[in-house]
Image (spheres, rainbow, N blue to C red):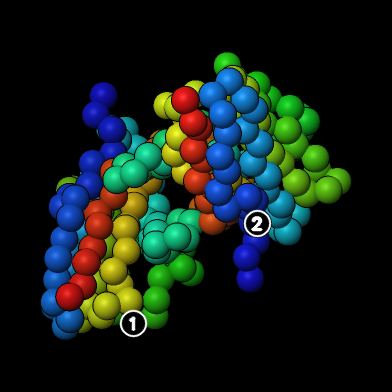
Amino acid sequence: QQQVKQSPQSLIVQKGGISIINCAYENTAFDYFPWYQQFPGKGPALLIAIRPDVSEKKEGRFTISFNKSAKQFSLHIMDSQPGDSATYFCAASSSGGSNYKLTFGKGTLLTVNP
Amino acid sequence: NAGVMQNPRHLVRRRGQEARLRCSPMKGHSHVYWYRQLPEEGLKFMVYLQKENIIDESGMPKERFSAEFPKEGPSILRIQQVVRGDSAAYFCASQVAPITDTQYFGPGTRLTVL
């Protein structure tokens, strides 16, 4: 059972464009939704995260939009740059029980063309 | 402040051998998570440990896999009698405490079973 579904699997965007990656979750106990960026041969690095008490969070060029009723959240990368080319993972966890194990989507390979 | 450290970065084993993967969390972090990443897949939770305690091992295969986080020294993920299906990237992440959500990932150990 895949609890976090991520789309698209791959995405090609021109420099300066907007990259949008979507995720949907099933477990209503999830209350923490981070996005990780991973470059080849490296570990995932936290990009931005959101809790369900807000519908949007922005940090620089990166924005998370969150729709609690639809159980969906998305990552928007404004003014995409070639250096943003990487694999992006959405994830979710539940703080109940003090165990923050993350459930990940399958990832989106983003390519930003110069 | 050094990040999460993992070694070795690459490990090659023949079928039937043992693999030992080490993870040193960030300074001050006493919580460690192990995740496995198969090719073209997202990361999947394996085990959550605190110093000297296994908190959640629901993602660990029942046989051949074990993990520990001793009072002194790194966390160890041990795979006995490796099979080709164990070939994957293994990441650990550390966390200060359950009070905060953020998990910081190491660079991973890429295990290849011949």
Q: Is residue B95 visible?
A: no
For mark 1, what is the residue?
A: B63
Disc 1 residue type (three-letter): Glu
How many angstroms separate mark 1 from mark 2 (CA)? Answer: 29 Å
How many discs mark residues in the rendered view? 2
Image spot of residue A48 (x, y percent) = 56, 30
B68 vs A40: above or below: below
Specify few, some or many for label 2: CA neighbours under 10 Å numbering under 14, 14-19, or 20 or more: some
Residue B8 disc label = none
Q: Residue at x 16, y 61 (%)?
A: B11
Residue extending furthest toward the right: A69
Q: Which residue shows up at 64% across the image and 51% down it?
A: A7
Residue A18 in percent (x, y) is at 64, 28
Return the residue nearer the eye: A98 or B94: B94
Q: Amino acid at mark 2?
A: Lys
- Rendered-image quadrant of the N terminus of chain B: top left
- For label 2, the residue is A5
Rendering coords of residue B113 (x, y %)? 21, 72
- Name the residue: 13% across, 77% down: B14
Looking at the rendered structure, the secondary structure element under dot 1 is loop
